[in-house]
Image (tube, rainbow, N blue to C red):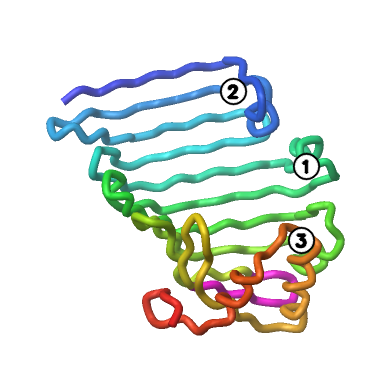
């Protein structure tokens, strides 16, 4: 059993990382290599002026468990990349479990925002300033599955269940509230939605997340 501790402060970063964490950051790692070649990570943390991320758990060829937490204090740092003004803060937490070697990993995600502004008036009206997303994303061998995915906006709730691979998305989108009808119009003004995806999305989803 081997325990390692490392700290690195004030190192410079470049490219997209500058926008994500700032031009300088600090990294901390403390972990133990067990006899079965599983690394028990007590802490793995990277901190910058605008963003922080941390992980604690176990990592091995057939093992992944633990929790990832991340925070972005000011989305305005991505405005130049997005080509429009952005604002707000984001915090995210994901509880991980699964077998990476078999491409079978599950993440229970909770993402919260404050004072969010994406520079797209229709989308900003739909989401409001504090949308909240939560749900389970699971990696399977040929794609992903969604369970209990839920987006709470200013005056609506959108739920998503189903699965997706590199070609198609299958499942159902449901919702409630006076602004759910705007979802398709907003989608048309944003990324292109393939007709096949829209047709598949209308199909009901059986228990377990598969479309019928």
Q: CA distance from mark 3 to mark 2?
A: 29 Å
Label drawn at residue 129: 3
The residue mark sitting in front, 2 or 1, is: 1
Instruction: Tell me which residue sits at (18%, 32%) in the image.
Output: 37
Q: Is residue 57 above or below residue 115?
A: above
Q: Is residue 34 above or below residue 193?
A: above
Q: Residues within 10 Å of mark 3 (few under 14, many from 20)?
A: some
The residue that label 2 is drawn on is 25
| Secondary structure at numbered mark 1 | helix
Q: Residues within 10 Å of mark 2 (few under 14, many from 20)?
A: many
N-terminal label among 3 and 2: 2
Q: Position of residue 182 (x, y in %)?
A: 78, 75
In the rendered image, which quarter contains the C terminus?
A: bottom left
Write down the region rendered in magenta: 152-161
The residue that label 1 is drawn on is 82
Q: Position of residue 170 (x, y in %)?
A: 50, 71
Q: Left or right? Give the position of 9 relative to 39.
A: right
Taking depth in this image into account, of 175 and 35 the one nearest to the observer is 175
| Secondary structure at numbered mark 2 | strand
């Amino acid at each position: 059993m081997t325990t390692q501790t490392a700290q690195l402060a004030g190192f410079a970063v470049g490219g997209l990382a500058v926008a994500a964490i700032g031009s300088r950051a600090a990294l901390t790692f403390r972990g133990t290599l067990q006899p079965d070649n599983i690394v028990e990570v007590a802490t793995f943390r990277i901190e910058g002026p605008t963003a922080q991320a941390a992980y604690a758990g176990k990592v091995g060829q057939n093992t992944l468990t633990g929790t990832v937490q991340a925070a972005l204090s000011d989305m305005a740092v991505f405005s130049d990349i997005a080509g429009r003004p952005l604002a707000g803060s984001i915090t995210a937490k994901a509880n991980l479990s699964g077998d990476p070697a078999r491409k079978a990993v599950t993440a229970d995600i909770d993402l919260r925002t404050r004072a969010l502004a994406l520079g797209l008036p229709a989308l900003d009206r739909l989401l409001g300033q504090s949308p909240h997303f939560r749900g389970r994303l699971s990696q399977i061998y040929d794609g992903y599955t969604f369970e209990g995915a839920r987006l709470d906006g200013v005056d609506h709730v959108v739920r998503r269940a189903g699965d997706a691979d590199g070609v198609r998305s299958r499942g159902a989108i449901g919702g409630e509230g006076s602004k759910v009808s705007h979802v398709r119009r907003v989608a048309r003004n944003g990324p292109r939605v393939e007709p096949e995806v829209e047709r598949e999305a209308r199909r009901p989803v059986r228990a377990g997340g598969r479309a019928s």
